[in-house]
Every structure is written in C-alpha cells, then in structure tokens.
C-alpha cells in the first residue's frame, strides 16, 4: 500500500539526541504508536537514558525491547527489526535498515547525519529504492533557526 509516507531527515550540525525527542513528542500528540530502531544495543540504551532526562518539565513515555511491557509502550526503542508494540510509525536512526514490510506503516522517518558520508550514501540508496516502489518520500532539512523545511 503506497499510502506509506517516508520522511528523510537530514541532520546538519545537529545531534540525534537534540532532534529525536521533539519528533517523538509530536508523534505522541497525534496519538501514534512509535518504534525507534537503532543500530546497536548500546546506542539504544543511551537513547533510552537520554529520553528520561532531556528536559526537566516533561516526560516522554517510552521503553525498550528488553522490558516485559514492551507491547504496551507508546514509544519503543529497539536494535531489532520487529514491531513489538504494533507501531504504525517507525523511526530509523544510525543507519538502521528499512523494514521489509514498509507498507505496514503509516509513516517511516529516517534520520541521517549529513556529515557522515556513509550515512548519506545509505540514505540516497533508500530514497531511490522507496521512490522506485511508488512510496511517497519527502526530504527535510533544518533551517538556521532549527525549523524543519521540506526540500523535496
């Protein structure tokens, strides 16, 4: 079902840690369930810790694939390709691969570091791949004020 939207977020001089929480908050405000896939267990543990502490006045409900309540989590962090919480939105970070079942998601958000040549090359390959399969893909970059703008 090519109704799946795929959003490519090009990070330039931005850390994933500063960008991801706000994007997750927006997803939760819309009532979406989210799974975030990273590349390694260590990285997922670090993101998990960061999401508990990134701001004093807020709380972003989330958990990791290791927990017994993983299926109930509104935001689930995992290094694996499964979807234990039945999320309709999947965030891919640190060059995590596109899922084989792209069409099962309403939205896939791929965040990549524009200063990492390999990450850029991987994102380009994914872009060509999803466009060839007929999915709607958009490309976003932050302006000087840090606001995301659609580039194509």
Image (cartoon, grey):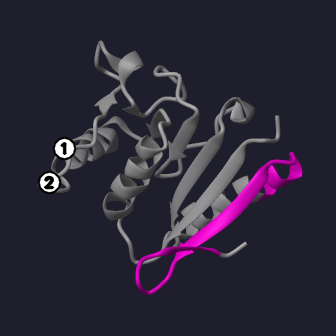
Looking at the image, residue 5 lies above or below residue 85: below
Q: Is residue 39 visible?
A: no
**Which of the two discs, 1 and 2, sits closer to the camera?**
2
Q: How many neighbours does mark 2 have within 10 angstroms: few (below 14), some (14-19), or many (20 or more)?
A: few
Q: Mark 1 and mark 2: span between their CA atoms? A: 11 Å
- The residue nearer to you, when weighing 8 against 74, is 74
Residue 24: x %, y % from top left: 41, 48
Question: Does residue 123 appear left or right of residue 78 in this picture?
Answer: right
Asked if marks 1 and 2 touch (Cβ < 8 Å), the reply is no
Question: Does residue 58 appear left or right of residue 88 in this picture?
Answer: left
Which mark, by number, is residue 90?
none
Quadrant in which residue 102 is drawn: top right
Question: Does residue 113 appear left or right of residue 123 in this picture?
Answer: left
Residue 17: x %, y % from top left: 31, 58
Secondary structure beneath label 2: loop
Which mark, by number, is residue 57?
2
Q: Which residues are magenta?
A: 128-150
Quadrant in which residue 42 is drawn: top left
Location of the C terminus by quadrant is bottom right
Residue at the spot x=70%, y=31% of the render?
A: 100
Residue at the spot x=31%, y=34% of the render?
A: 62
- The residue nearer to you, when weighing 110 against 150, is 150
Residue 34: x %, y % from top left: 47, 36
Q: Is residue 151 visible?
A: yes
Looking at the image, residue 100 lies above or below residue 29: above
Location of the N terminus by quadrant is top right
Q: Is residue 152 magenta?
A: no
Query: Label 1 belongs to which residue?
Result: 52
Question: Does residue 145 appear left or right of residue 17 in this picture?
Answer: right
Q: How many marks?
A: 2
Quadrant in which residue 141 is drawn: bottom right
Secondary structure beneath label 1: helix
């Amino acid at each position: 079902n090519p109704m799946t939207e795929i959003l490519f977020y090009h990070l330039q001089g931005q850390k994933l840690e500063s960008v991801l929480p706000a994007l997750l908050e927006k997803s939760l405000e819309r009532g979406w369930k989210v799974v975030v896939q990273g590349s390694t267990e260590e990285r997922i543990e670090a993101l998990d810790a960061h999401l508990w502490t990134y701001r004093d006045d807020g709380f972003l409900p989330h958990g990791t694939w290791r927990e017994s309540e993983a299926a109930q989590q509104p935001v689930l962090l995992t290094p694996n390709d499964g979807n234990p919480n039945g999320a309709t939105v999947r965030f891919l970070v640190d060059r995590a691969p596109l899922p084989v079942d792209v069409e099962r998601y309403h939205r896939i958000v791929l965040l990549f570091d524009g200063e990492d040549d390999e990450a850029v090359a991987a994102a380009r390959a994914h872009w060509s791949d999803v466009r060839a399969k007929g999915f709607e893909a958009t490309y976003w970059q932050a302006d000087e004020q840090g606001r995301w703008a659609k580039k194509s």
